Amino acid sequence: MITLLKPPSTDNYWKNGVMPYQVASLKGYLSRECDITIDDLEIKVWMFNRLNLNNGIDLSYYSYRNVLSHLLKKPDEMIEEYSRKIIRLINNLKNPVIAFYVENSEELLVVLTIGQILKKMGKSVVLVGAFFQTISCALMKKYDFIDYIVFDSGELSLEYLLKNKDPKAVPNLSYRLNKRVLLSQCSDIISQNLIPMPDFSGLPFDLYKKYNSQHFGFSSLVLPYRLSQGCGRDCFFCGLPKYNYFNVQKPVKAVSELKALTKKYKTSKVFFYDNSITFSNSYLKLFCDQILKNKLKIRYVAFAHYSDLKPNDLLKLRKTGCLALCFGVESVSVPSIVNLKKNKNLHTISDVLKNCKKAGVWTHIFVMCGLFDQTLGHLKKDLLFIKKNIENIDSILINQFQLLIGSDIYKNPGRYGINKVSYTLAPYSRSLPFLPVNRKATSQYNYYFKAIGRLRIPNFEPDRCLSFLFNESRKGLMIDLMKKRPVLGSEGFLKLCREAHEQDRT
Ligand code: SF4
């Protein structure tokens, strides 16, 4: 019997009202064999804080410094109190195994403090997630309250573990034997086609609806879904786990599951969590055909790669309910990025953005700054590119380059002309400060982007923007309003959308 949790994150950045996908997918898979309860502590902490305005759980207190000092030196009263409050929010604490599906170091900070208390309560503490691929042993050695770490998406490993198989035979597992930390054999993840439909039951649906209603103006659920696992590309800065093969669901299975899920959870809003929904033109065509053939009515948002998107592809995507695509443009001039996309050219990006607009698809782009080989000249070229294409860009998010454990530049700095990498944070942090970071270029970027605000580009959290887009009827209105307004921050944008919503209703 196991309770599987989505932990709260110390980072507000990705906070949204979308349900956790992998937790529900694991429930769908494991419930055939065992008793599993799932819960989302992130949305619960949010609600707890809303109800206890002066006595909430301050996640910003979970800094690296505070958490490390609490775990390794002297217990911190505040962290102890907050962690106990979080534990009280867990749905089913009776189960002997408490597992956390962890996706980043901001979640891990909270998980470690809760895990320590749960272990004292006699629970078996299991951490799950491909995030742990390169750090599981180091973590187990440092924190003896962790019983197991599964460093893949969890299906087979959790199933075997719960069936009490010898840890040696459980794939992708860190475990203890005679006080030594050992690794089981590494193995490929299970095919997406063998995983049953995700089961979201047990999650606090009312809280998501409340969150969406308060933040985005609609009170239905947003369904996360994934067509593929892994990524066919190999960006040097990417810290996402690399699987040995790219794992794709058959379009027939995906569409039939989406049909059942949208009916069961009474929503048409879908958020595709694939690293890129445009991984194959032929797949995309088959998927869209299946949607149309089955008369599946969804409205969706997805990440995409711009390389092979033709006008007809975009029209077809729009016809099947695509509201927005998010592209990782990063930079059109910094050598390390441009070399990565050497077979592409600026016309491709511009054309895809233009064609999205023509098809009625919202365009969101990610820009990266602070790269080690970025100069002021590159910066200006990037901004020029944005200015030229501004009519076809709906929103932008600027990311700061970070050295991520597992990325190619982390493993092979010499390949990029870097001789020395120094760290200041704990060795389990996936995002480490990168000393050769071009801080000057970063601050210039921010400065110039403020100036570009005159062009009225809202720069805000993508999920907020994306969730708004699900209010499809308001989309045209939102864009028109934005054109009439001066510079908007995220708050300004939210206000604007609320106004648009009001106007739309009257
Ligand atoms: S950054 Fe995106 S496209 Fe590049 S390897 Fe990572 S997931 Fe794939």
Image: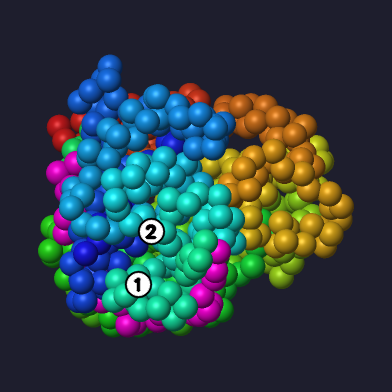
Which x, y percent locates residue 107? 44, 45
User: What residue do we see at 34% from left, 30% from top?
Assistant: 82
Kind of residue at badge 1: Leu
Q: Is residue 70 visible?
A: yes
Q: Quadrant of residue 296?
A: bottom left
Q: Is residue 431 left or right of residue 257?
A: right
CA distance for labels 2 and 1: 10 Å
Secondary structure beneath disc 1?
Answer: helix
Q: Position of residue 196 (x, y in %)?
A: 26, 76
In this view, 343 is above or below 392 = below
> Residues at badges 2 and 1 in contact (C-beta under 8 Å)?
yes
Residue displayed at 75% across by 34% down? 439
Disc sitting over residue 161 in the figure: 1
Residue 204 inside the magenta-drawn segment: yes
Q: Is residue 190 magenta?
A: yes
> Height in image: 364 above or below 231?
above
Q: Residue furthest top?
A: 54
Q: Identify residue type, mark 2.
A: Val
Task: Give how far across and how far down residue 477 sits, in percent.
Answer: 32, 39
Residue 126: image tag: 2
- Vertically, is 220 above or below 409? above
- Residue at screen point 35% across, 48% down: 119
Q: Quadrant of the N terminus?
A: bottom left
Q: Which residues are magenta?
A: 180-209
Task: Please report whichever mark, 2 or 1, sits nearer to the chain's N-terminal start.
Answer: 2
